[in-house]
Image (spheres, helix red, strand yellow):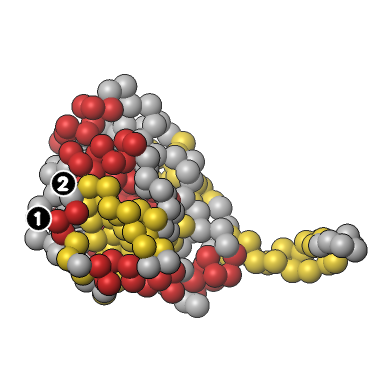
Amino acid sequence: MANDDLDNIINLDVNCVSLPDGQLIPEQREVVKEEPLTLDIKDVGTYTLMCTPSDAMALAVGFAFTEGLLTKRDDINVIMKCPDDPGVIRMQLAHPETAKAGRRNLLIISSCGICGSEDIDKVINALPVAGDQLRISMQDLLRMPQLLKDKQAVFHRTGGTHAVALMQGARIVALGEDIGRHNAFDKAIGSCILQQIPTQHLAAALSGRVSFEMTTKAASAGIELIAAVSAPTTLAIKTAQKTNITLAAFVRNQNATIYTHPHRIIP
């Protein structure tokens, strides 16, 4: 496990109980950290996210990207951790006057998505439509969740995180792990932006369900395929259909359900 992963975990003294005897047994358990991260974007706004502490820079950049505040690495003039408070990241954009106003207010909890939108259809219609370059074999599609799971270092220790892997074929290009599904996606996208790796035409493996918010993040990044181990929502399916994303869910046990645009998957 990398040092950044260890930063996400604390050891706690707990009492465990099991049947049939029902005795309390003192033990130690590893628990995933949840901490606030404040992103202060000069002349744009301040946002506080509840998250795991690792990959904070990637989370900040990915969040700003999926909020429509930037589109590429060159849009960022300065990004740095505050020397007085490592829980604060300061960012200065090259053109703050063109950054869109954030869709959400100051506190964004770990499970939160695109809350408070007054007109979901307007949000969907404003999303970019994915390209049509990606093709993937059924075998590689079914391998995606296991490849992701193998890299979930913090989950294996605590059972408390979600993860998203951005993939090119069977190769993981970037990975994000966090207590929040949305944060994990933002970390993966932000990692690509910081390394100047294009996200267009990639596939995304998700450790959980597919919500509307997760699909909008994929569309914003030009991702062509989502493979999730759990279920999609109706709005996720609608958004994937509208934005030309192949949405595969229940990808597990050598099975998958393809909800939209199945032409990218080759038997």
- The picture places residue 231, in percent across and down from the top left corner, at 41, 48
Residue drawn at (33%, 46%), measured in percent from left and top? 214
Residue 91 appears left or right of 110:
left
Q: Secondary structure at mark 1?
A: loop
- Disc 1 designates what residue? 132
Q: In the rendered image, is residue 62 in sight?
A: yes
Residue in the foreground of this view, choosing between 215 and 260? 260
Residue visible at 28% across and 66% down in the picture: 141
Which quadrant of the rendered structure holds the C terminus? bottom left
Relative image position of residue 4 (x, y in whole percent): 47, 70
In the visual, does 235 lie left or right of 73? right
Q: Is residue 73 left or right of residue 5?
A: left
Horizontal and vertical percent for residue 241?
A: 20, 41
Q: Mark 2 falls on what kind of element?
A: loop
Horizontal and vertical percent position of residue 37? 46, 49
Please name the amino acid that badge 1 sits on. Asp
Instruction: Give the number of the disc on residue 244.
Output: 2
| Amino acid found under the numbered disc labelled 2 | Asn
| Residue 58 in view here | no
Label 2 crowd bin: few (<14), some (14–19), many (20+), radius 10 Å: many
Question: What is the residue that sits farthest to the top in this orientation?
Answer: 118
Q: CA distance from mark 2 to mark 1?
A: 8 Å
For residue 140, above or below residue 128: below
Disc nearer the start of the sequence (2/1): 1
Q: Residues within 10 Å of mark 1 (few under 14, many from 20)?
A: some
Q: Are marks 2 and 1 in contact (CB under 8 Å)?
A: yes
| Residue lying at 65% horizontally and 66% vertically, measured from the top left | 30
Frontmost residue, 50 versus 80: 50
Q: Residue at x 16, y 59 (%)?
A: 264
Marker count (numbered): 2
